[in-house]
């Protein structure tokens, strides 16, 4: 069995990649993808911690919560990409700095 620390390092790495994407990217699509990476890191962390809570027992509540979280994240990202498509058609750009200037 893989130790808990390896999973925690993996989830921490995914979360840092998502934070880096949010901090440095200017494209709206990349920002949404960074948020999705962070959500997936949190879900993976939740599953790993629920599996290692007690030896030989995996909590089904954590799995059901993560399935709901994945469903909601998919719906939110679909709505975000729909808004992004309309913004690109209207303004012709996906650069977040230019879109902030258009706020007026």
Image (spheres, rainbow, N blue to C red):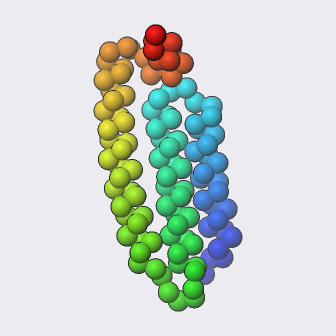
Compared with 63, 93 (above or below) is: above
Please provide percent x and percent y for residue 92. Answer: 38, 14
| Outermost residue, bottom side | 56
Q: Where is residue 78 in the image (x, y as percent from the top left)?
A: 32, 41
- Residue drawn 39% across and 50% down? 73
Name the residue located 45 percent from the left edge and 32 percent from the top edge: 29
Q: How many labels does the image show?
A: 0
> Would you place residue 15 above or below residue 94 in this image?
below
Viewer-closest of 9 and 99: 99
Residue 26 falls in image quadrant? top right
Residue 62 as seen in the image, left or right of residue 49:
left
Tell me if 103 is positioned left or right of 79 in this view: right
Q: Is residue 63 left or right of residue 83?
A: right
Q: Where is residue 67 in the image (x, y as percent from the top left)?
A: 37, 64
Relative to 16, say whether 92 is above or below.
above
Q: Residue at x 57, y 72 (%)?
A: 49
On the rendered image, what quadrant is the N terminus found in?
A: bottom right
Above-or-below relation of 72 to 49: above
Q: Quadrant of residue 24?
A: top right
Q: Residue at x 62, y 67 (%)?
A: 7
* Percent position of residue 35, x then y: 50, 43
């Amino acid at each position: 069995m893989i130790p808990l620390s390896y999973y925690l390092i993996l989830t921490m790495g995914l979360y840092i990649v998502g934070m880096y994407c949010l901090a440095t990217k200017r494209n709206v699509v990349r920002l949404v993808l960074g948020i999705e990476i962070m959500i997936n890191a949190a879900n993976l962390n939740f599953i790993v911690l629920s599996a290692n809570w007690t030896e030989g027992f995996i909590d089904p509540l954590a799995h059901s919560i993560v399935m709901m979280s994945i469903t909601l994240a998919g719906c939110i990202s679909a709505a975000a990409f729909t808004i992004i498509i309309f913004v690109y058609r209207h303004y012709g750009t996906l650069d977040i700095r230019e879109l902030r200037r258009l706020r007026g």
